[in-house]
Image (cartoon, rainbow, N blue to C red):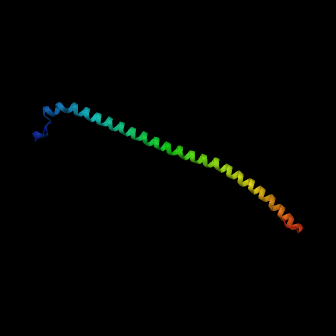
Amino acid sequence: MATDNPAAEPGPQSLAFSPATAVQNLYAAIGQALADAAKNAAAAQQQGNVVAQAATTEGLATLFSVDTATLGLASKEELGKGLAKAKAGLARGKPR
């Protein structure tokens, strides 16, 4: 390396530290990659829990609404019978 500034030239001490610096940078990169992987795994697990909770909520709402819908249809049918009897009685001129 030919420069006019002797401070810019690598000295024997800086060359001696180069392998250690390279390993340090490698370990830092590996550590960052593992930290990112753990963070992504935690985020994916949380997202999965949200989806599972939403599915459970929808499933329970469906189960509970089946009972309500059945009751509503039965009530409508019974009320319809009573209304038909009342109309028939009114048509004959008799109050119920």
Q: Residue at x 33, y 38 (%)?
A: 32
Viewer-nearest residue: 2 or 35:
35
Q: Is residue 16 left or right of residue 35?
A: left
Q: Position of residue 13 (x, y in %)?
A: 14, 32
Tell me the quarter of the picture where residue 8 sits.
top left
Tell me the quarter of the picture where residue 4 sits.
top left
Tell me the quarter of the picture where residue 14 sits.
top left
Q: Is residue 3 above or below residue 65?
A: above
**Where's the N terminus, which quadrant?**
top left
Q: Position of residue 71 (x, y in %)?
A: 71, 52
Q: Is residue 58 above or below residue 34?
A: below
Q: Position of residue 93 (x, y in %)?
A: 88, 69
Q: Residue furthest bottom?
A: 93
**Where's the C terminus, which quadrant?**
bottom right
Q: Is residue 34 left or right of residue 48?
A: left
Q: Residue at x 75, y 57 (%)?
A: 76
Q: Residue at x 13, y 34 (%)?
A: 11
Q: Is residue 96 above or below residue 20?
A: below
Q: Is residue 84 left or right of residue 67?
A: right
